[in-house]
Image (spheres, rainbow, N blue to C red):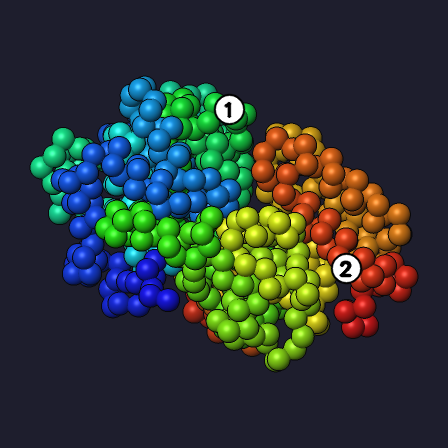
Amino acid sequence: MEKLLLRNVDKENSHTIEVYLRSGGYQALRKALKEMSPEDVIEEVKESGLRGRGGAGFPTGLKWEFAAADVKEPKFFVCNADEGEPCTFKDRVIIEKDPHALIEGMLIGAYATGCRYGYIYLRGEYPIGKRILERAIAEAYEKGFLGENILGTDFSFDLYVHSGAGAYICGEETALIDSLEGRRGEPRIKPPFPVNAGYLWQPTVVNNVETLANIPLIVERGGKWYSGIGSPDCPGPKLYAVSGKVKKPGVYELPMGTPLSEIIYEHAGGIVGDRKLKAVFPGGASSSVLTPEEIDVPMDFPSLAKAGTMLGSGAVMVLDETDCIVKTALRLIEFFRHESCGKCVPCREGTDWLVRIVRRIEEGQGTESDLDVILSVSETMENSFCGLGMAAHNPVASTVKKFREEFLRHIKLGRCPFRSG
Amino acid sequence: MTLEEFREEVRKLKRSNRYPADRSYILPALWIAEKSFPAITHDIMKVIAEELGVRPVEVEEVAEFYAMFHTKPKGKYIIRVCTNLSCMLNKGEELLARFSDLLGISPGETTDDGLFTLEVSECMGLCDGAPAVTVNEERFLKVTPEQVPEILKKFGWKG
């Protein structure tokens, strides 16, 4: 398929405004500001069928419509560039290689929703991205795409980078807002949703990097064109970040709904050393595992939900036959324990207990009844305050369900069968 | 940087007028402190609190919450070795052990000469280059245990 989101990334100095302008950059902004009303822009995005690429898959046009309908002023437009889901690195590519696509997407979104100020909430682990974004923002001010009366219209918009400092929870939009307000990142109760009560309790749109990079394309070529790409009920191009035991790890742009097997074997080159595939997490660390028998699934939100897992951030993590599933589950739940903010009991205690139990199984001290305890703790964690806790048990519970034999082998052998000695 | 120079930096930050609420400058101010001092001490937190009109504890709770802020002294170079899934599958833990052996410190510790702090990192989004290591802001990708001495020497390790 024609490269859309990655159309610029291979060009030399793709991060500079000169290269972006030469490639037709900021034409969509011009079109939106000069030829379209904010309502027209929202209609176009609604027609495109674009769903948020951060993980939740909420329809972007609808979110914008809610924000536009709120009359409180000022409104804020925030880009969620906290990309913290383990093994997700798709937004990094846009941030570092095509930052102006992101800025243009934000500008169009801010115009459509009536937002006066914007922040890019960038994870602290991306210092190179920070320099690139700040430079890109300065360039955009210089050329008159940011600031007062943009392109001679009434529309004004100021944009800043706000650096996080190493907290996965800040990818959750309300925790992100807390962090933007200078607090510990802890999620807030919803509703009210950020579109009505976000930053400083003012209307705030929060969109993911990849979501926003789609916007100039939609405005330029139309929502109808966009809705024809990929899965009909969840259209558009999608960036899949593939890593783990594949020959060619990387970010692949493919139509939404591309089968997982095609992504692994055709695009990412298959399994390292031509070994056998063992398991795949199709949507980041918080998605449920899939077995080799399940990989014909189309990679889109509804298909993966039907398969009992989720698209999440679209991070495909591949394990081969030599990898230990128990150790994998342990590493992922250790991550969630570290990142749990501690606000609610099911997540704080649940992640801690899962680490203890899975660790003792990996170390050969587990019992068969531990497996039932894991599933019972997981069920309780469904009642967590926010999505972190609700999903954190997925890699553990799903591996226990689908690779029960391997857990039992650890228990019966009294050690990890994949570890030598 | 002296405390008074730092105070001036925080004031400069405020004058940038980036946020409608002073509280929002807490993280940017802590970032300046993180980059300018070996540790974010109570004295530094107090300066931030005074300039932004919040209580010192409100700065401290933020400084303690985020993994990348150091409230205890750190080395000149922070080595972050990722051991999250893709790096783990590609032997990130062996790399960590190698760094630990050569430097004679455990993860979380700083060498006696104050040059290196070794940290186990959660995912840094460099999974296409697993296993990944960063030293301050510099990236090292697809690192093998054999390359570890080379990396350390680049930052003044005498071995």
Quarter of the image with the C terminus of chain B is bottom right
Position in image of residue A213 (x %, y %):
33, 50
Q: From where the camera sits, is residue B142 visible?
A: no
Q: Residue at x 64, y 53 (%)?
A: A307
Residue nearest the observer in this picture, A82 or B82: A82
Look at mark 1 in the image and give the residue it sits on.
Answer: A191
Q: Which mark sits nearer the N-terminus, 1 or 2?
A: 1
Q: Position of residue A171 (x, y in %)?
A: 49, 41
Q: CA distance from mark 1 to mark 2?
A: 38 Å
Q: How many marks?
A: 2
The reply to whether dot 1 and dot 2 touch (C-beta < 8 Å) is no
Q: Is residue A91 left or right of residue A343?
A: left
Q: Secondary structure at mark 2?
A: loop
User: Which chain hosts label 2?
Assistant: A
Residue A220 in view here: yes
Q: Chain of mark 1?
A: A
Q: Quadrant of residue A338?
A: top right
